[in-house]
Amino acid sequence: MFKGKFTPTEGGVYNLSVRSDKANRKVSVPIEVTAPRREKLGQPAKLSVMKQLANYRGAWGRTDKLEEIISQIHTLPEPQAIEMPVRVWCHPAWAMLLIVLFAAYWSLRKLAGVV
């Protein structure tokens, strides 16, 4: 068995080939690696977030009033917590608990000679 590790330095299509001399086989698979997109200088990374901030404030701000914009951003309300319901009966621990209880019940009945 052979293990290998390769960290690509740039995006593109790489061809992974595996060969076995004993079985006289060769397998080849193309793997596409995407390069990370970098933020362009002077442009916002996420325009939708910038527009959302502008909607909270009411308008786009200018850079000469940067301290005022920052103070208004700090006074924004905290987002409400997202409640995610937990379905207890769907959890695998319940199945394990039932199996353990049934196994204990069966074992105790076997020891008592009831079965």
Image: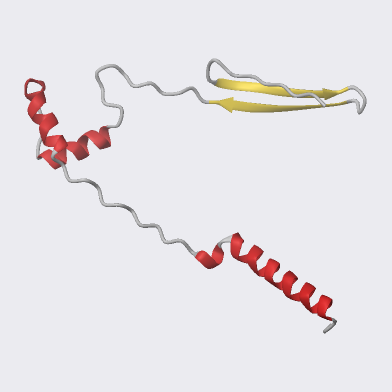
86 or 32: nearer the viewer? 86
- Name the residue nearer the viewer: 89 or 31: 89
Quarter of image, res 18 = top right
Q: Quadrant of residue 75?
A: top left
> Which quarter of the image is occupied by the N terminus?
top right
Task: Identify the residue shown where x is 79% and y is 24%.
Answer: 2
| Direction from residue 11 to residue 6 in the image, left or right | right
| Quadrant in which residue 37 is drawn | top left
Q: On screen, 73 above or below 81?
A: above
The image shows residue 81 at horizontal and vertical percentages of 30, 52
Question: Image height check: is 59 above or below 32?
Answer: below
Q: Name which residue lies at 11% across and 21% down.
A: 63
**Above or below, 48 relative to 105:** above
Taking depth in this image into account, of 56 and 112 the one nearest to the observer is 112
86 left or right of 115 in image = left
Q: Position of residue 73 (x, y in %)?
A: 15, 35
Question: How did the renderer colour the structure?
Answer: secondary structure
Q: Answer whether residue 57 is visible to the viewer in this image.
A: yes
Residue 35 placed where, x, y %? Answer: 49, 22
Q: What residue do we see at 60% from left, 65% from top?
A: 94
Q: Residue furthest front?
A: 112
Horizontally, is 40 left or right of 58 in the view?
A: right
Query: Which residue is found at the position 6% from the left and 24% from the top?
Result: 65
- Exactly how many numbered labels are in the figure? 0
| Quarter the C terminus occupies | bottom right
Q: Position of residue 101 (x, y in %)?
A: 68, 70
